[in-house]
Amino acid sequence: MKNALWLVIGIGTGFLAAHQVNRTETGRAFFEELDARMQEFTAAVTAGYRSREAELRGAPDTDR
């Protein structure tokens, strides 16, 4: 239970710090760049997943 409390305190502190950083122009630019990189990463993972899924669906069934 003590660890859960520290986790909640850490998340809350991180949220407050991020909110304060986002108020500055430099901080806002940082978070916009971070968001763009995360969207790019997510798109790459999604494309890879869909590609692999299509590859597996098109492969002959080798279990029989």
Image (cartoon, grey):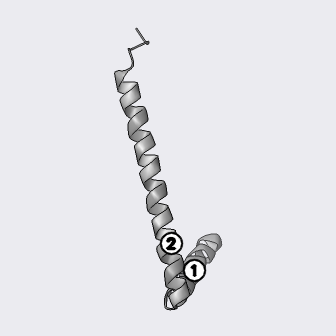
Quadrant of the drawing holding the C terminus: top left
Q: Position of residue 37 (x, y in %)?
A: 50, 63
- Return the mark for residue 33: 2
Q: Residue at x 46, y 66 (%)?
A: 36
Out of 64 and 53, give the one closest to the viewer.
53
Residue 54's image quarter?
top left
Q: Residue at x 64, y 74 (%)?
A: 2
Q: Amino acid at mark 2?
A: Glu
Quadrant of the drawing holding the N terminus: bottom right
Q: Position of residue 13 (x, y in %)?
A: 58, 84
In this rendering, the label closer to the viewer, 1 or 2:
2
In the displayed structure, 63 sits above or below 30; it is above
Question: Counting residues from the N terminus, which is met first, the one under dot 1 or under dot 2?
Answer: 1
- Return the mark for residue 1: none
**Contact (Cβ within 8 Å) of mark 1 with mark 2:** no
**Circle 2: element type:** helix
Q: Residue at x 49, y 83 (%)?
A: 28
Mark 1 surroundings within 10 Å by alpha-carbon count, few (fewer than 14), some (14 through 19), many (20 or more): few
Out of 11 and 24, give the one closest to the viewer.
24
Q: CA distance from mark 1 to mark 2?
A: 18 Å
Q: Position of residue 12 (x, y in %)?
A: 54, 82
Name the residue furthest top: 64
Q: Amino acid at mark 1?
A: Gly
Residue 10's image quarter?
bottom right
Out of 30 and 64, give the one closest to the viewer.
30
Say left or right for 10 vs 51: right
In the displayed structure, 52 sits above or below 18; it is above
Say left or right for 61 vs 38: left
In the displayed structure, 62 sits above or below 45; it is above
Reading the image, the residue beneath label 1 is: 14
Q: Position of residue 7 (x, y in %)?
A: 60, 73
**Circle 1: element type:** helix
